[in-house]
Image (spheres, grey):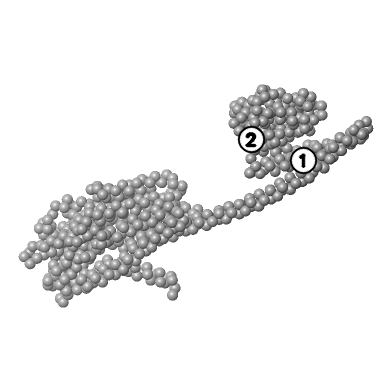
Amino acid sequence: MNPGRVLRWLIWFWLASIMGAAAQGLPEGLAELRIDVLRDPGAQLAVGDLAALGERFAPLPGGVLNAGFTRDAFWLRISVQRRAGAPQDWRLEVRPAFLDDLRLYAPTADQSYRVDRQGDWLPYSTRPFRYRNPLFTLDLPDESRQQFYLRVASTSSLMVMPSVTTPEVFRQRAQFSLIGLSLFFGVMIAMIGVNLLYAIALRDLFFGAYGVFLTLELLGFVNVEGMLAQFFFQDSPTIPDRLVGLTTYASFGLGMVLFRQFVRVRHYLPRLDLIVVFAAACEFTVSLSALTDYFSLLAPFGQLLILPATLITLVAAIMAARTGESGAGFVAAGYFAHIVFIGYSALSHVGVFATGVDPYLGLYVSVTAQLLFFQVGIVARAHQAERTHMALLERAQTAQEHAEKEQQLRETQSQFLNMVAHEVRTPLAVITAATNSLRLFDANLPQVTERIDRIERSAQRMGKLFELCLAAERINDPQDKPQLQPVSLLSLIAEIAAEHGLEPGTRLQIEDHTRGQEIKADPRLLKVALSNLIENAAKYSLPDDPIEMRVDLAGADEGGPGIVFDVIDRGPGVPVEMRERIFEKYFRAEERKGVPGLGLGLYLTRRIVASHGGHVRVLDGTGGRFRIYLPADK
């Protein structure tokens, strides 16, 4: 069987079952059924006054009275005449169930009236029929016209839908209507369960909040249909009476809050967003007023705010759908399906419309469509978010795998470099020792001495190369943090000068203004950083040009208390446009490619200084001028 046909059949069956309860033509067995209405300002009239006011009664259009929120009473004059052979016993059903005070005045043989009083101000247990809506007996003893009066007053929205049938027809319609309501309530309960499961599975509070919204809607409909009083509060009429306004307007307010957030009204319509916020706050206020005697005064205002808030949210939903936001199109469709009823209901509840159309038919149809569209939209948004989340997790997992592979490669490379450096150090030491021995044997031969010097410089350069590579590996390892300890600056500089053959006071001129102060740093890394600057100064200046190193206390202009190292030479200097690029890895200027080097020295210097919380930069002036700043609190 085609699932689509089954779904369409169920929907039509459900709609027909609800509509069947309100179908109102001339019932079979009646020769006449006429209902007229008279407004009773201030609820001052008695049944004895009505005979003189007969001409003021007006026909009730469509058999539905819709007066909105009012303190006036209304009198319905029900004229009934049965055909010959028709049953004497008839039923008058009055919807909705939340009407406060209903009084049926039935004529008696002595020209007086018998009063049957019902309504949700009275305990359900006092009703003559165990039925959710007020139900009265109409006794038609013969074929003559009988005239009944129904007085209606209510503090809630005054909407009256009377229906006259035989007991048998009433039972059939009641059963058919109950099936339709059961389907409607079943759909809502299923959606509440679905949202609860989604809220637990996805840990998404929006599903939980939407489940609360659906629960309020369900309670409102169950109460409007009189089932709370029928099954739970038979002797406590006040509770269902208060809950009508409480649940209805609370669901209005919560729905505004939820879908304002869902379609991002503040993002798409920032100037109108405050209207929705204000409307939601008013709906919650009206909801709470249902517990007081001010509900009938505030409720019309709450009804009027529903339409503008809904229109604003609808426009925002359309805008969100056009930008491709998942689920927004379904929310827009839900609002569009419901917008006509909301407008009609909001205006009819305050008495603007007095048409005879049964609004509850549109209510059930539009609410079902709206809630289903909303549910599909919310689930679509959740699935999109879940897909995005899974994609992010997959991307993160891929990045983690790449990071682990990179770490493994880095460790392998580091191990290889350490092994090579270890293996090379021994031959280099042998070469150095051999050159020293050769100097002893051939010290007086200039050509031999020059070759020995060249061999020694090459060996030193190779050793320096491996030191730079090892330093680069260490500084690039995120797990290898600088090992801070007190460092004597003068001792460190003297050690560096000795390694480069620059005795302090000769070519290397040192100015110390720190008075022998120590600083916390990693001595191995700091030695590499300073050594690179001194080596650069030696390479890019003439052999006899002095190299200045100034050590001073840092001021606020450098970033706070600390130490600054200035290395100054008399070489060509660094052009302004190159002052950042020279710190890039492997960068070497075209005009300096004749000078030996790998382009790692300044890169490592910046990385080492940054790992200590400091910075290195090129200063203005003639020649090369580099400054290292190390903070004291590092």
Left or right: 153, with 304 as reference point = left
Circles 2 and 1 in contact, beta carbons < 8 Å = no
For the question of whether residue 357 can be seen, the reply is no
The local secondary structure at tag 1 comes to helix
Which one is in front, 605 or 618? Answer: 605
Which one is in front, 77 or 97? Answer: 97
User: Any mark on residue 465, and which?
Assistant: 1
Query: In the image, what residue type sits under mark 2?
Result: Leu
Q: Residue at x 73, y 33 (%)?
A: 531
Q: Quadrant of residue 138?
A: bottom left
Query: In the image, what residue type sits under mark 1?
Result: Leu
Q: Which residue is situated farthest in the right direction here?
A: 445
Q: Residue at x 68, y 42 (%)?
A: 474
Q: Residue at x 24, y 62 (%)?
A: 230
- Find residue 510 and report its horizontal and vertical position in percent: 73, 25
Q: Earlier in the sequence, mark 2 or mark 1?
A: 1
Q: Quadrant of residue 548?
A: top right
- The residue beneath circle 2 is 484
Left or right: 120, with 603 as reference point = left
- Find residue 499 and report its horizontal and vertical position in percent: 77, 32
- Find residue 171 and report its horizontal and vertical position in percent: 24, 70
Give the position of the N terminus as an image quadrant: bottom left
| Marks 2 and 1, how far apart at CA | 25 Å
